[in-house]
Image (spheres, rainbow, N blue to C red):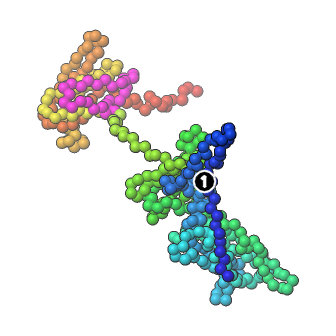
């Protein structure tokens, strides 16, 4: 006889009340608030029950196996059962379980008095991924008639949610951001994404303080909370990069004169690599002195757009200018720019340069 099932759906809303304030007068009933998850394609990661519901709705097939170390496999014995929902029927793990419960297994064992019997159940999505699994084991018992029978726990057991559940589709990359109680990021995980674009989401992240972010193959992105059904707006911020290279200052194009003052300490320091761009033929003056008054002997220079990296020309200091206000000397080098382009200048110092290695590290041990 065909069994029939009645399914009762219960919708929870805010309670509707009508409070009597006086005879014949009442406060209008509260309007129910309906919340939907349709706008959040990652709704299933917000809680354990949501992920379980999602996994149940993905199952359309299942299998059970029973075996012992001495089992014999063949046409005589039915050690396994496999069931699949009819094509077009809505997927549901409980429907598959009901089909499996109708199956009869007939397995073999050589030493029923000592051999342990094992069983395994798997519930799968249509792509073959295990959504739920369960197992049982035990030894056979003998009744008063001499018949061997399995323990009830062998095939009556809970099926557990798998540690990883495939979610979403058409994903190119995903990451999980975990936060502390103050909202600071404390860890970032990158879940596996299958070749067909599905995220293999670890159930341990459910309910954590943080977000899951999925970059879709169409270029869009989705960000959702791991502890509630909240979707975050991804904010786009325009930013312009403005960076430089330490020790290589660049000056205005077509500068007529540039004066550099590298820092020195006790005669030591790092000399800068000066870069100036020229779009015209002109006379250029490079002046230099250290913060302790050292002036260069000359300058090495090259056009970076027309010269090789080791092709440098040299000019000595042509004159020395003294600022009598603070009695500072500056060595000036006049350079004729005959070909437009970007030029690099390296100053030639007699004493100024990096400190010797023994300045930083004491080689001596003192007298004993």
Residue occupying the point 29% across, 15% down: 328
> Please, what secondary structure does the residue beneath circle 1 have?
loop
Q: Which image quadrant: the N terminus?
A: bottom right
The residue drawn where x is 34% and y is 38% is 240
x and y percentages locating residue 140 in the rendered image: 78, 78
Report whether residue 189 is seen.
no
- Residue identified by numbered label 1: 47
Q: Is residue 269 magenta?
A: yes
Residue at image location 22% in from the left, 40% down from the top = 304
Which quadrant of the structure image shows residue 323? top left
Where residue 76 appears, as percent x and y from the top left, is: 67, 89
| Residue 220 pos. (x, y %) | 41, 53
Which residue is painted at 63% across and 54% down in the image? 12
The secondary structure that dominates the magenta segment is loop
Q: With 212 as the anchor, is 256 left or right in this view?
A: left
Q: Residue furthest top?
A: 325
Q: Residue furthest front?
A: 24
Q: Nearer the viewer, residue 319 or 218?
A: 218
283 or 179: nearer the eye? 179
Please report the bounds of the magenta region as a residue range.
247-272
- Which image quarter holds the C terminus? top right
Is 78 rendered above or below residue 43? Answer: below
């Amino acid at each position: 006889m065909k069994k029939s099932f009645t399914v009762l759906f219960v919708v929870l809303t805010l309670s509707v009340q009508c409070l009597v304030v006086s005879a014949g007068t009442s406060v209008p009933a509260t309007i129910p608030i309906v919340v939907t998850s349709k706008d959040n394609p990652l709704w299933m990661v917000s809680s354990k029950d949501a992920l379980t519901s999602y996994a149940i709705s993905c199952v359309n097939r299942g299998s059970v196996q029973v075996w012992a170390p001495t089992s014999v496999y063949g046409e005589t014995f039915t050690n396994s059962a496999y069931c699949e929902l009819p094509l077009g029927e809505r997927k549901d793990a409980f429907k598959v379980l009901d089909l499996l419960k109708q199956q009869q297994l007939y397995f073999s064992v050589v030493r029923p008095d000592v051999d342990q019997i094992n069983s395994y159940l798997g519930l799968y999505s249509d792509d073959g991924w295990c959504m739920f699994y369960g197992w049982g084991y035990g030894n056979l018992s003998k009744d008063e008639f001499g018949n061997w029978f399995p323990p009830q726990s062998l095939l009556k057991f809970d099926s557990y949610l798998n540690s990883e559940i495939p979610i979403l589709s058409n994903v190119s990359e995903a990451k999980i951001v975990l936060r502390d109680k103050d909202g600071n990021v404390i860890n970032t995980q990158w879940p596996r994404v299958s070749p067909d674009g599905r995220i293999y989401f670890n159930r341990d992240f459910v309910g954590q303080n943080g977000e899951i972010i999925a970059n879709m193959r169409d270029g869009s992105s989705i960000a959702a909370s791991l502890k509630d059904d909240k979707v975050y707006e991804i904010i786009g911020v325009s930013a312009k990069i403005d960076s430089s290279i330490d020790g290589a200052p660049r000056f205005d194009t077509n500068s007529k004169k540039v004066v550099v003052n590298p820092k020195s300490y006790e005669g030591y320091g790092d000399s800068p690599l000066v870069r100036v761009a020229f779009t015209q033929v002109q006379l250029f003056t490079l002046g230099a002195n250290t913060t302790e008054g050292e002036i260069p002997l000359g300058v090495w220079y090259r056009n970076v757009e027309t010269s090789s990296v080791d092709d440098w020309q040299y000019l000595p200091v042509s004159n020395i200018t003294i600022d009598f206000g603070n009695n500072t000397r500056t060595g000036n080098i006049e350079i004729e720019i005959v070909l437009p382009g970007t030029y690099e200048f390296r100053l030639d110092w007699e004493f100024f340069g990096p400190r010797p290695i023994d300045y930083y590290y004491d080689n001596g041990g003192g007298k004993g």
